[in-house]
Image (cartoon, rainbow, N blue to C red):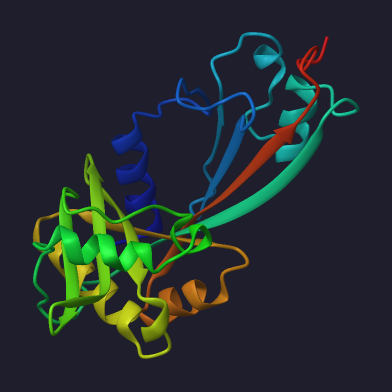
């Protein structure tokens, strides 16, 4: 799979057909997501507000988009970035069972803190799942929710079992399942999550996009730029 093919599949799965997309699911406190794809296409997501949108340049940097929409003298912007990876070739992973024991999955997440699952939570109802069990105890789990041809992956590993390669095993197995169903696996990693970035590199995944987002902390009134 090429970068252009991945971009096309991702855009089709989201229904994005123009460079600036109004997204009803975005909150005003977390208003801007700028996606830069490896084939150089750029898409900006903003909440469904009209003020200032006509001023947004489709090729604008994140700071320029924010300046168009908000009075940055009145708010504090906290930025983050996430890299989206895809598998350019078939993934050779072992065959692992799907999640069938919801109690064991709940115990796994009970052992984790909020930071561990910040990029998503695995559920037994996900479109694709797999797990690693030992004597009835769930050591690692992975799930993916499908939207169009894209299956967005979440991974969980028990804190006591980290550093043993379980994350790579369960992720590779899940990508194999996803590809076997004719879908494209998407693996996300925050810019400061070095273990997650190393996992993507170790599995031979390729960068598909960089998502830059921002959270705004602002007074209660006058948040939109005049």
In the figure, residue 165 lies in which quadrant?
Answer: bottom left
Q: Is residue 99 left or right of residue 213?
A: left
Question: Whole-percent x and y of residue 220?
Answer: 76, 17
Tell which of 53 and 42 is nearer to you: 53
Quadrant of the snapshot with the C terminus: top right
- Quarter residue 107 falls in: bottom left
Residue 112 visible from this viewpoint:
yes
What's the residue at 11%, 63% (across, down)?
101
The mark total stands at 0
Between 7 and 151, the one nearer to me in the picture: 151
Q: Is residue 123 above or below residue 1?
A: above
The residue nearer to you, when weighing 174 against 29, is 29
Above or below 44: residue 156: below
Task: For residue 61, say whether it is visible.
Answer: no
Q: Quadrant of the N terminus?
A: bottom left
Vertical comparison of 14 with 18: above or below: below
**Residue 221 image offset from top left, x and y in percent:** 79, 13
Q: In the displayed image of the protein, which residue is found farthest to the right?
A: 73
x and y, in percent, of residue 144 in the image = 25, 54
| Front-most of residues 81 and 58 | 81
Q: Residue furthest bottom?
A: 164
Q: Quadrant of residue 49?
A: top right
Relative horizontal placement of residue 96, taking residue 89 as reference (left or right): left
Seen in the picture, residue 171 relative to 46 is either above or below; the reply is: below
Residue shown at 50% from the left, 73% from the top? 197
Task: Look at 12% across and 55% down and name the residue there.
Answer: 182
């Amino acid at each position: 799979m090429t970068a252009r093919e991945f971009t096309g599949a991702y855009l089709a799965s989201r229904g994005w057909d123009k460079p600036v997309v109004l997204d009803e699911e975005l909150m005003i406190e977390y208003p801007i997501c700028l996606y830069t794809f490896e084939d150089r296409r750029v898409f900006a997501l903003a909440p469904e507000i009209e003020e200032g949108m006509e001023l947004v340049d489709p090729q604008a940097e994140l700071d320029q988009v924010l300046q168009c929409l908000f009075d940055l003298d009145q708010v504090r912007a906290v930025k983050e970035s996430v890299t989206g990876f895809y598998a350019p070739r078939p993934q050779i992973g072992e065959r692992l069972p799907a999640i069938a024991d919801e109690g064991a999955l709940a115990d796994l997440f009970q052992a984790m803190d909020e930071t561990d699952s910040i990029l998503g939570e695995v559920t037994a109802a996900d479109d694709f799942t797999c797990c690693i069990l030992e004597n009835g105890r769930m050591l690692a789990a992975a799930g993916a929710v499908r939207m169009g041809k894209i299956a967005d992956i979440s991974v969980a590993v028990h804190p006591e079992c980290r550093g043993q390669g379980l994350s790579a095993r369960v992720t590779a197995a899940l990508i194999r399942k996803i590809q076997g169903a004719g879908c494209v696996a998407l693996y996300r990693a925050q810019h400061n999550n070095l273990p997650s970035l190393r996992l993507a590199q170790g599995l031979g995944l390729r960068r598909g996009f960089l998502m830059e987002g921002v959270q705004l902390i602002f007074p209660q009134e006058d948040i939109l730029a005049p």
